[in-house]
Amino acid sequence: MQYKAVIFDMDGLLIDSEPLWQEAGKEPLLEFGVELTDEQYHSSTGLRTEEWIEHWFHFFGLSMEYAPAATDTILEKAIAKIEDRGTIFPGVASAFAFFSTRNFKMGIATSSPLSLVEVVLKKLNTGITFDAIASAEKLPYGKPHPQVYLDCAAALNINPSNCIAFEDSFNGMIAAKAAKMKCVVVPAVADYDHAKWGAADLKINSLAAFQQQHLLAL
C-alpha cells in the first residue's frame, strides 16, 4: 500500500490536555453532586463536549435543561486550562519530521473546536504547516463517526485508504478504522494494556517510537 498522508488526532496525542479536559469536565458535574471515576471518564474520551455532557447527563439522570450551559462552561474552562498549562508530548516534533521528510501530506482531525486548535498550534511551534485541519465541532456526528477523518482526507485530496491515522482514544480509533484508514494508537500509560486496542493496526507507547520498520509493516 502506498501511503500518502498522515492525520493526527490532537488532544491526548499531540498535547497533554486530557487531564485538563478531565478537570474542566468534572467541575460542572460536581455542581450536580456527581463525581466521575477515572475509569468512567476514560470510557468517554474522544467524544465532543456536547456529546460527552449528553452521555453523562443521561447516565446520571440529570435534566438536559442544564446541558447547554454545562457544555459552554467546560469548553471555556478547558481552553483556558490548556492555554495556561497544556504541554506538548515528547516525540511530536520527531514524528512530524519523520513524515515531512518523506513528503507525506499532514492533517489534524479533532473533536475539539477550532478555537482550541489555534491554541495548540501556537504551542506546537515546530515549523510544520499542516495541509488540512478538520474539526468535528459543527458536524452532525463526532467520533466514533468517521466523518471528521473523511473530511480531512478530502481536504488533503487523498483517498482515505492511503492515509495513516494516529489516535490515543478508543472512539478515535473506531472513527479512523471506519474511515478505512490504517490506525496507529498511542494509548495513555494506564490504559496501554487494555484489550480494546486490538482493532488498531499498530500500538506504540510514544510518537517518537514510530520508525521506518513500522511504516513498512502497515
Image (tube, rainbow, N blue to C red):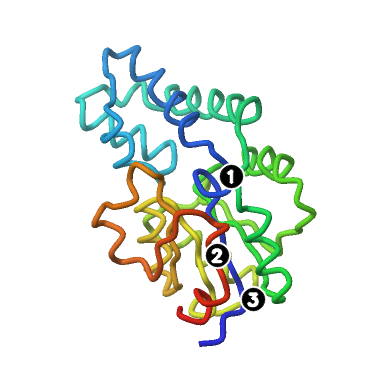
Please give the residue where the numbered disc 1 appears in the rendered image.
89
Residue at the farthest bottom position: 1
Residue visible at 66% across and 67% down?
Answer: 98
Q: Which residue is mark 3?
A: 157
Marks 3,2: beta carbons within 8 A: no
Locate residue 31: give its quadrant: top left
**Measured from the top left, where is residue 105 in percent x and y?**
67, 71
Residue nearest the viewer, comparing 195 with 52? 195
What kind of residue is marked 3? Answer: Asn
Q: CA distance from mark 1 to mark 2?
A: 26 Å
Amino acid type for the residue under numbered disc 2: Asp
Mark 2 highlights which residue? Answer: 151
Q: Residues within 10 Å of mark 3 (few under 14, many from 20)?
A: few
Q: Name the spot of residue 81 as percent of width and height, x first.
A: 58, 25
Describe residue 123's horizontal placement relative to residue 52 as left or right: right
- Where does residue 52 sit, x and y in percent of width and height? 36, 37
Distance Cα–Cα, label 3 vs label 2: 10 Å
Under mark 1, the amino acid is Phe
Identify which residue, 118 or 202, lies in the foreground: 202
Residue 6, picture quadrant: bottom right
Q: Residue at x 64, y 76 (%)?
A: 157
The disc placed on residue 169 is none
- Report the Cα–Cα distance between label 3 and label 1: 28 Å
Q: Residues within 10 Å of mark 1 (few under 14, many from 20)?
A: some
Q: Is residue 113 above or below residue 139?
A: above
Viewer-side label of 3, 1: 1
Q: Closer to the N terminus: mark 1 or mark 2?
A: 1
Position of the C terminus by quadrant: bottom left
Q: Earlier in the sequence, mark 3 or mark 1?
A: 1
